């Protein structure tokens, strides 16, 4: 298709720009966000193709920013008449207001992913065949396998961002993902394991035989471990977190609290703490949207600002927030490339990209050996966080006892309970094996979902509250 989205309107660019300029006259900021997106997903469950979808969507979102107020309207109709109707609604926010239109974002020449649409390759038939192979492979691997669910998904998003000052930014964003989950059983007991991989590129290596088989083996391994797991103890104990995906706890317990809007409104547990110690010495946390082909990466954010490598916590001290343009301006800070939206139907807000903790100087073996009695959390499932208080609860999907410095029996039902700022102070050892997740993260905020990445090295955290089933 033609990726010049302005040409999809029933009018010429000059007329569109005239409406945009009139609408944003007197505004502090704003833009016309135009989007065309395609998505496909297939799911295979219990030996049959359970679901399939293909969607195409396009539309625009028009925004005017006046101080703390935002006027926003959107439509799926790329027509001049729809744009004028949106302008009438959005323009209300600037009536009686006189601002100075903010300078456009700085440009870079860096592209973090290709333009190719991943939906067409491999073919629909090949994708169905792949899901069938995954199902057959796992069922043949172990007689304990009772259910296999596999899904494959791809999307392709084209965005154009027009500003009233004449600036125009353009981005094409591919995304792919493969997920495998398996349920194993022994008698009346059943347990599950899962694996996911993805990124901003074509399927490529993700669907190569050795790659998907490694993923299937990992899902089965986790399920079989859980099948032998004993009830987790409850109480206060030392906890070791594995590298990679357990960074999702950092994302939730700390990352959301460092988004600019929560701090401007003083609803974050980190509000007013800039420059102060908020984590143990040695803890450095960054949000990095510049990693090539990663799920959370963006060449530009949804306001046109190039993504950045943003240090949030440096050696235990709070040094930065993640900012969109509006909150950055109101807080007297710089936009950091974190203004994100789910689609043209949503207003942008500060959101994470790839958020992770940098590595330290301890080996994973050294960290585990240092714990007399505790829990080794290898993987997490869902969690809940209260941004204002920082309190969190996370369930472990794979965890083990640590007994005299050695990994012991697997446990089920382990829950980590704590407070984000407090938990960051309880870190006493940081591993030298920082790793990002495999590319499966999604983040929800304000009713919007965006793809993200997480990561961390092995960590030791002292005296954490663990919820379990054994007193």
Image (cartoon, grey):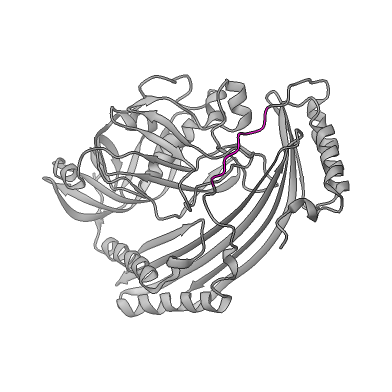
Q: Nearer the viewer, residue 48 or 58?
A: 58
Residue 46 visible within the image? no
Q: Is residue 238 magenta?
A: no
On screen, residue 394 versus residue 62, left or right, reads: left
Q: Residue at x 70, y 56 (%)?
A: 3
Residue 402 location in percent, x, y? Answer: 17, 47
**Quadrant of residue 456 in the image?**
top left
Q: Residue at x 63, y 34 (%)?
A: 105
Residue situated furthest left in the rendering:
404
Q: Nearer the viewer, residue 382 or 276?
A: 276
Residue 75 location in percent, x, y? Answer: 78, 48
Residue interval drawn in magenta: 103-110
Residue 226 location in percent, x, y? Answer: 29, 61
Which image quadrant: the C terminus?
Answer: top left
Residue 63 location in percent, x, y? Answer: 73, 36
On screen, residue 68 versus residue 362, left or right, reads: right
Q: Nearer the viewer, residue 143 or 298?
A: 298
Give above or below for 4 relative to 391: below
């Amino acid at each position: 298709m033609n990726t010049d989205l302005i040409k999809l309107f029933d009018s010429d660019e000059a007329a569109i720009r005239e409406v945009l300029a009139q609408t944003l006259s007197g505004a502090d900021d704003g833009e016309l966000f135009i989007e065309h997106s395609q998505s496909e997903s297939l799911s295979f469950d219990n030996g049959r193709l359970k679901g399939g979808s293909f969607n195409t969507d396009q539309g625009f979102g028009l925004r005017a920013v006046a101080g703390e107020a935002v006027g926003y309207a959107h439509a799926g109709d790329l027509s001049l008449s729809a744009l004028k109707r949106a302008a009438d609604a959005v323009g209300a926010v600037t009536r009686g207001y006189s601002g100075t239109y903010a300078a456009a974002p700085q440009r870079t020449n860096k592209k973090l992913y290709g333009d190719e649409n991943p939906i067409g390759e491999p073919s629909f038939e090949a994708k169905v065949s792949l899901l069938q192979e995954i199902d057959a492979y796992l069922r043949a691997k172990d007689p304990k396998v009772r259910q296999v669910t596999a899904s494959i998904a791809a999307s392709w998003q084209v965005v154009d961002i027009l500003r009233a000052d004449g600036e125009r930014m353009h981005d094409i964003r591919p995304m792919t993902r493969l997920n495998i989950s398996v349920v194993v059983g022994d008698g009346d007991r059943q347990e599950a394991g899962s694996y996911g991989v993805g990124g901003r590129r074509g399927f490529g290596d993700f669907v190569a035989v050795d790659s998907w088989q490694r993923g299937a083996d990992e899902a089965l391994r986790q399920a079989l471990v859980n099948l032998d797991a004993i009830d987790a103890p409850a109480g206060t104990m030392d906890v070791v977190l594995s590298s990679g995906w357990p960074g999702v706890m950092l994302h939730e317990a700390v990352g959301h609290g460092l988004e600019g809007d929560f701090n401007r409104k003083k609803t974050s547990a980190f509000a007013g703490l800039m420059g102060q110690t908020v984590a143990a010495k040695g803890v450095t946390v960054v949000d990095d949207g510049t990693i090539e082909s990663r799920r959370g990466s963006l060449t530009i954010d949804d306001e046109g600002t190039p993504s950045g490598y943003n240090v949030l916590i440096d050696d235990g001290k709070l040094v930065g927030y993640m900012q969109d343009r509006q909150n950055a301006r109101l807080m007297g800070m710089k936009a950091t490339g974190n203004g994100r939206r789910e689609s043209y139907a949503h207003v942008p807000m500060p959101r994470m990209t790839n958020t992770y903790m940098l590595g330290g100087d301890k080996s994973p073996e050294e960290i585990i050996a240092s714990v007399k009695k505790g829990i080794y959390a290898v993987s997490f499932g869902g969690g809940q966080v209260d941004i204002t208080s920082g309190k969190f609860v996370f369930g472990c999907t794979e965890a083990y006892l640590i007994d005299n410095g050695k990994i012991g029996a697997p446990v089920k039902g382990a829950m980590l309970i704590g407070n984000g700022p407090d938990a960051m102070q309880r870190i006493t050892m940081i591993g030298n094996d920082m790793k990002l997740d495999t590319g499966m993260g999604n983040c929800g905020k304000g009713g919007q979902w965006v793809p993200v990445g997480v990561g961390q090295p092995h960590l030791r955290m002292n005296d954490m509250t663990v919820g379990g089933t054994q007193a």
